[in-house]
Amino acid sequence: MQSLRGRDLLSLADLSLDELSGLLALATQMKSGEIRVRCPEKILGLLFRKASTRTRVSFSVAMYQLGGQVLDLHSGVTQVGRGEPTCDTARVLDRYLDIVAIRTFAHSEVEEFADFAKMPVINALTDDEHPCQILADLMTVQECFGDLAGLTLTYLGDGNNVAHSLMLGAAMAGMNVRVATPEDYAPQPMMVERAQELAAGRGEVVVTTDAKAAVEGAQVLYTDVWASMGQEDLASQRIPIFQPYQINDGLLGLADKQAIVLHCLPAHRGEEITAEVIEGSQSQVWNQAENRMHAQKALLASLLGVA
Ligand code: CP
Ligand code: NVA
């Protein structure tokens, strides 16, 4: 694939279809051991304002496997948590690090950081998008079904950061995307329009409140928590509103017989997904979580210009 050397990944919409396909292919070849690359002198910074298990550990292990180093720069141990301006932090860290992954609240913060830093900046989750997650998700779907184009993926639950990035990535890949949410929890209209543009007439992008209709015949069912980080206070009041969007045996029974179930994790069993489904034979969540590491290793190698 063509290297993404020096680029940022703030949104999946930053990639062309060729670049997305190239990254997925590279991740698959790295996972199988067909391609091995090294970047021994490179240092990745993880600048996180929110908790993380998968993203933090998978980025760290990926960088170690590439022979590089990792600095954990949680906002609580840096001046970031005490309000140092992003434009200052970006220009300073740019003098030390080779690449940075940022997890924060406002998407504008990663955009501002990228404006002030020359090194590649990776969005490791904002309130609006979670592009690294979707690289792993699409890789997992490819492993299960081969070609992505023409498959139907249904996302159920909150129209959040994961839903946004999933719409963008799956639409770009030519999948049919159905997003089913309660009325006031639909994805941002701007994201829906962008996904429709990226679909370029190859697949449909549909937003609905009808969970059952959205699931019918789908090959991939996907859900995420009903209250994201920063929305903890709203969690209990959302439970009855989101109940019809729970992935359970009833809803799964309406999907394609071969359907797989994905969840970015962490999961709340009994809320957005039942224990039976997440632990069941159609669940791919553990492979999906593993693929975070392979997909991000490919991303790091490409942005650092070693693959
Ligand atoms: N899916 C995901 O991003 O998990 P973490 O919040 O644990 O990183
Ligand atoms: N939507 C969730 C994803 C967690 C990986 C959140 O932002 O908390």
Image: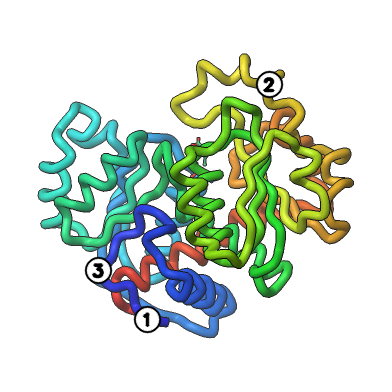
112 left or right, relative to 201: left
Amino acid type, label 1: Gln
Assess whether mark 3 and mark 2 are in contact (beta carbons under 8 angstroms): no
Residue identifier under label 2: 241
The quadrant of the picture occupied by the N terminus is bottom left
Crowding around mark 2 (Cα neighbors within 10 Å: few <14, some 14 to 19, many 20+) is some
116 left or right, relative to 72: left
Amino acid type, label 3: Gly
**Residue sitting at x 43%, y 58%:** 12
Could you give the CA–CA distance between mark 3 and mark 1, rounded to whole angstroms?
12 Å
239 left or right, relative to 193: right
Q: Which mark is residue 49?
A: none
**Residue sitting at x 11%, y 57%:** 95
**Earlier residue among tags 2 and 3:** 3
Question: In this view, which residue lies farthest toward the front?
Answer: 201
Q: Which mark is residue 2?
A: 1
Residue 83 in the image: state x and y as whole percent. 18, 28
The answer to which of 237 and 140 lies nearer the viewer is 237
The quadrant of the picture occupied by the C terminus is bottom left
Residue identifier under label 3: 6
Amino acid type, label 2: Ile
**Residue sitting at x 71%, y 18%:** 240
Crowding around mark 1 (Cα neighbors within 10 Å: few <14, some 14 to 19, many 20+) is few
The answer to which of 46 and 191 lies nearer the viewer is 191
Looking at the rendered image, the disc whose residue lies closer to the viewer, 2 or 1, is: 2
Assess whether mark 1 and mark 2 are in contact (beta carbons under 8 angstroms): no
